[in-house]
Image (cartoon, rainbow, N blue to C red):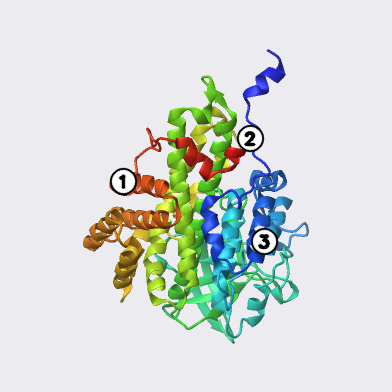
Amino acid sequence: MGLEQQLQNQVPDLMDDDLFGEDPALQHWQSKLASDEARQSLADYGKKLGSAHWREQGALANRQPPQWRGWSAQGQRVDQVDFHPSWHHLMSLGMEQGLHIWPHQPQPGQHLQRAMGFYLHGQIEAGTLCPLTMTRAAAPLLQAEPFQEWAAKLDINQYDASHQLMAEKSSVLLGMGMTEMQGGSDLRGCTTEAHPEAQAFRLYGHKWFFSVPQADGHLVLAREHEQFSCFLMPRYTEYGLNRRYIRRLKDKLGNRSNASAEIDFDGALAWRVGQAGRGIALLAGMAARTRIDCVLGSAALMRQALVQSLHYCQHRRCFGKQLIEQPLMQAVLLDMSLESEAATHLALFLVDLQERADDPVAQAVLRVLAPAAKFWVCRRAIALCSEAMETWGGNGYIEDGPMPRLLREAPVNSIWEGSGNVMCLDVQRALSQEGVLEALQADLRARTGDDAELGQAAQDLLSTVSQAGGRVWTQKLALLYQACLMRELAPDAVADLFATHRLQEGPAVVFGLEGVEQASWYLHRIWPRLQAS
């Protein structure tokens, strides 16, 4: 057999994919954008990201992870993190799109436009999402004196990777340092100390996970006279490198393009942000904003894993048919498509709630639903990416293709900014706050309406609210909202399938909806490119 014959059943790389225009879940949400210009911007971004060039940039950034360089050739401490050029190209792309900006006076649809861009970007490269989300989530804390100069440079649609003082840069990035070796999620175990010095503080201690170590500034939790405060720590001072020293970069399972560090503080200069003793509350607010991005990032991974599976099965022949025509494979792909679409709707619904800052019911629902969505969607991304890898067979396990990176990337959003149990406890905490349960009840009544099945599911859930804080109750809350959104936004046949196989039967251990008539119609709808082939 000649080489040409051997290659006949090999699948070409997916390229020149329209990430925005061929995603049916985005078509509803784009109607909420403020202008045709906003829609066109996202359409252009989706086509650009789906090109062979940007897919290769994403792969390169992960094949060549960042390296820590502690000292210069002259023996001077520099603590620089060196990235492959592809990282800088991707950061420039994301910042030009405004993915790092928190609008001070948001216009209708502005949060949603950014969220959709973030979701598109995450399908091609997820590591660069970390500095973008950190910078955006920190921005609301730096709007008042004396941080206006920092705030102004957070709003610039330009990437500046130079190593110099904030005042000399065109734009800045921010990171966060909360957890320590002995404490983890228990922030009250923080031992880093802040000692006052003139109008500033000197910090002594360490952080076990220090996000975006190359950032121009970090929001750091530290003890100030036995109370916990938040501090802005610059990377450089007028005397050079601040006294915050990298021990090492973390060797992570996934998220390889992005740097995370362990770090020591030996009298590092910092300024308090907000009132003394409000550090945990301020940083918890920042974490709440990044949790929504965790859900968006997981939905992005799920969508890309699904599309890669559809592409592969469309081109691969097996046992006399295209793989996508085999009934069992159709069952798997159909189930994955339901999961992905529901995840995208729930993620963007959280942002829609975020948009309604003046609506107390929306904010109360967001308070309880965001941790529930993070718990459920981020966890389901791991299962879906694993199943997607298997649709490729042995080829899915090989590093030449995209599937290993997607699977390695999936767990981080479930762990970062609070793992599963922390999210469930946060759901319980939210429901104990005044007005939250009542707002949830009112919102579910409005959403379920005359739908008997959804109404019964809501009644059953709310009758067991004493179990809130458990994993099963949190899962049911997320699934109920997904079912409501699918009923509102997807075709009836799709919503019926989701309700039957998620609400009535509960999600199965394995993916696969067997015996569904016209399964190919569902698959063509979820990725219209199949129809054109």
| Above/below status of 151 relative to 496 | below
Q: Secondary structure at mark 1?
A: loop
- Quarter of the image with the N terminus is top right
Task: Check contact, mark 2 vs mark 3: CB within 8 A.
Answer: no
Q: Which of 34/302 is in front?
A: 34
The amino acid marked with disc number 1 is Gly
Where is residue 122 drawn, in percent x and y?
58, 53
**Residue behind mark 1:** 506
Q: Which of 75/188 is in front?
A: 188
The amino acid marked with disc number 3 is Ser
Where is residue 33 drawn, in percent x and y?
57, 66
| Residue at 47% from the left image edge and 50% from the top image edge | 341
Circle nearer the viewer, 2 or 1: 1
Label 3: few (<14), some (14–19) or many (≥20) C-alpha neighbours in 10 Å: some
Q: CA distance from mark 2 to mark 3?
A: 32 Å
The amino acid marked with disc number 2 is Asp
The mark found on residue 400 in the picture is 2
| Residue at 55% from the left image edge and 56% from the top image edge | 27
2 or 3: tag closer to the N-terminus: 3
**Residue behind mark 3:** 41
3 or 1: tag closer to the N-terminus: 3
Where is residue 173 drawn, in percent x and y?
64, 67
Label 1: few (<14), some (14–19) or many (≥20) C-alpha neighbours in 10 Å: some
